Image: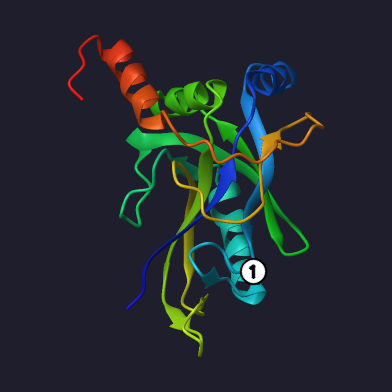
Amino acid sequence: MGKLLIDTIPFKMSKTQINESMKENNGRLVVEGVLQRSEAENQNGRIYPTEILKREVKKYIGREIKENRAFGELDHPESSVVELKNTSHIVRDVWWDGNDVMGKVEILKTPAGNILKELLEAGCTVGISSRGMGSVKESSNGKTVTVEDDFDLICWDFVSNPSTHGAFMRPVNESASVKPTKSYNKINTLVRDIICEIDGVCSI
């Protein structure tokens, strides 16, 4: 029986890049970059075969993106269902560049989307994470596992714990690349402060 498979790519952008993206997109924050990578071992020791990932991306484009429901959440739940109440963004386009799955993502003005935007403006590094159901097969050396043919892509979420090597998203219409960073501190504190400010009462 398949299990929930999650793999993440780090993502960071500056406040200047955020402002420029919103200016170029009529007040919408839109970013683009690598969503996922095939035929490469990630930090989870997991490899996605190109044929399987291409099949799932094609389905995702023809289903979720075409029907304008390619939603994702802020933090991935242990669930195969995307909860609208936790939606922070929507994927507007997906395409291939070699072995990289590229995407254009709009950060929505929802409560979760506003938290994500605040995190990005504060210079925090978050991750964009694929969520899917499937099984894996362990390699003969026991160091890697390969995703099998029953894999079913659900969505891409934004999360706090990056795991994929060397891929960073950038704002649309911004030519400068985002520099890698390993500074993941203060994210939980910032989320708490944002929620407390919105609610007026700090219960977390």
Picture layout, residue 48 above or below residue 169: below
Local packing at callout 1 (Cα closer than 10 Å; few below 14, some 14-19, many 20+) is: some
Q: Residue at x 56, y 64 (%)?
A: 42
**Residue 102 seen in this snapshot:** yes
> Image quadrant for the N terminus?
bottom left
Q: Residue at x 66, y 50 (%)?
A: 167
Picture layout, residue 168 above or below residue 48: above
Q: Position of residue 171 (x, y in %)?
A: 70, 31
Task: Give whichever of 149, 11 is nearer the camera.
Answer: 11
Q: Position of residue 162 (x, y in %)?
A: 51, 48
Task: Give whichever of 202, 111 is nearer the camera.
Answer: 202
Left or right side of 45 for 21: right
Q: Residue at x 69, y 44 (%)?
A: 33
Task: Give whichever of 15, 93 is nearer the camera.
Answer: 15
Picture layout, residue 176 above or below residue 167: above
Left or right side of 104 for 108: left
Left or right side of 22 for 137: left
Q: Where is mark 1, residue-wise?
A: 40
Q: Amino acid at mark 1?
A: Ala
Q: Residue at x 51, y 70 (%)?
A: 45
Q: Position of residue 180 (x, y in %)?
A: 65, 41
> Image quadrant for the C terminus?
top left
**Residue 69 seen in this snapshot:** no
Query: Please, which residue is most extreme toward the right here?
Result: 175
Picture layout, residue 52 above or below residue 64: below
Query: Please, which residue is most extreme toward the top here?
Result: 200
Count of numbered labels shown in the rendering: 1
Left or right side of 123 for 200: left
